[in-house]
Image (cartoon, rainbow, N blue to C red):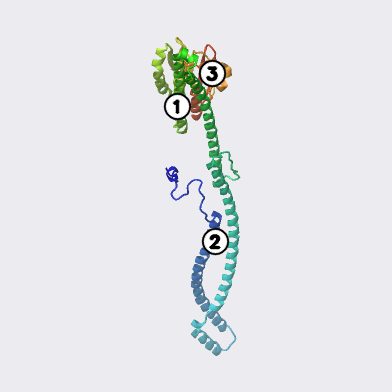
Amino acid sequence: MSQSTILAPSPFKGMPQPGAALPKSLKLSTRLVLAMVLIGFLSAIIGGVFYQVQVNRTIQKIDARVTSQVVDDVIARLQNSRLSQVVINQTTAYLESRKNDVTLRPILDLALDTSVWIILAAALLVSGVAFIVGWLLTRRLIRRLELVRRASLRVAAGDFNISLPVDKFDEIGQVSYAFGLMSQALQRAEVKRRELLSDVAHELKTPLASIQGHVEALRDNLPRARANPDQIYQIVLEDVEDLNRMIGSLRTWLNSQGTVENMNLEPLSLKAELGDVIERFRSRADSANIHLDMRLDPQANRVKADRNALRQVVSNLVDNALRYTPAGGYVQVTGWLGEGERPGQGSPDRVTIAVRDTGIGIAREHWAHLFERFYRVDRSRTRDTGGTGLGLAIVRELVEAQGGRVWLNSQPGKGTIFFVTLPKA
């Protein structure tokens, strides 16, 4: 198979493949400055043309009006002068006849030329200042964008430990802030991925080592293999079942991650949701001779949660309770208003769900680690219970993603209570 068929096409048409050299082009700052200069020159040219046209029209009007007014003023002064009447009449007649030939256009043109040069000099000065200010602002803008570009390349290379400075909370500052949040989320996801791989490798090692040892004993025909081969076959089969159970739990955990990423928080009826979960475990509880029931305060019937997440949380807790409760015991699911181990405690805007059992209980030294992935209390590491240590880790992630929290209280030999709080709808 050729390399071209292995590499996935770029998601953007015409873009180079990841890792390929980027094509050379003008820097964004250079293009912005050139665009500003071009727009300035075009604006000056267009403005100058309109200015010249308008000035010519104005000069024509001013020339005709001012010329007529000047001749009239001269005639009025002649009439009031001490010259002889004959001279006044002849001069007046001459001015009247040459009235249309008199013009002030040369004087106005000279004044116009002076004003044009003054306006041009001022425009050049303002354009120069605008160019310098624009260049400085553009350089600062591009410098901040360059930091984002370099950080993006580092993230693409797998380095998620990046933080960008946010000196101003403008558009670029908001982009830098969002980029930092994304980097932190990717870093947490990478840490979780590595921890998960490490945990999975550690958990798979034990049953695989057991299978390898017993198969080698059979292959080498060791005395213990010859003495009781059926026992070795049974042990290998149980180890394989452990592996299958662990892979199933991992698949469930990965599905719960999809639920966390696609939460749809909505008002839900606890009576309906918990009732469906209880009915799913009813036959299992009856066959194990365990009493299973539900008690719910009517005031605590509505919660704001994701339906799939809520059902999975309660299902995991009820499943654990049934697994570690002996025959003749009971498992009870209750709900009340408040946030505490008794009704009425804490905020009235929260609802507490409790799953109580009369099982073997859990020693206090295990409580802090009980919600960690693959953590199992020693007494639960039996083939009868079959726990993989992922159920409570899933519960904690789903509860926290819905804005709640989970904790427990337990007494060895007497039972355990798991508490879950969620926002009231």
Question: Residue 222 in the image: x percent, y percent?
Answer: 49, 16
Asked whether disc 3 touches disc 2, contact meaning CB atoms under 8 Å apart, the reply is: no
Tell me the amino acid under the disc marked 3: Val
Tell me the amino acid under the disc marked 1: Thr
Pick whichever of labels 2 and 1 is earlier in the sequence: 2
Along the viewing direction, whichever of 357 and 425 lies nearer the viewer? 357
- In the rendered image, which residue does mark 3 sit on? 377
Seen as rendered, the residue at the extreme top is: 328
Pick whichever of labels 3 and 2 is earlier in the sequence: 2
Question: Residue 336 in the image: x percent, y percent?
Answer: 48, 20
Figure check: 161 above or below 82? above
Asked whether disc 3 touches disc 1, contact meaning CB atoms under 8 Å apart, the reply is: no
Q: Is residue 23 visible?
A: yes
Q: Residue at x 45, y 32 (%)?
A: 258
Instruction: Give the Cα distance between marks 2 and 1.
Output: 61 Å
Q: Residue at x 43, y 27 (%)?
A: 308
Seen as rendered, the residue at the extreme bottom is: 86
- In the rendered image, which residue does mark 2 sit on? 37
Q: Is residue 305 visible?
A: no
Residue 136: quarter of image: bottom right
The residue carrying pointer 2 sits among few (fewer than 14), some (14 to 19) or many (20 or more) residues within 10 Å by Cα, namely some
Tell me the amino acid under the disc marked 2: Val
Along the viewing direction, whichever of 11 and 55 lies nearer the viewer? 11
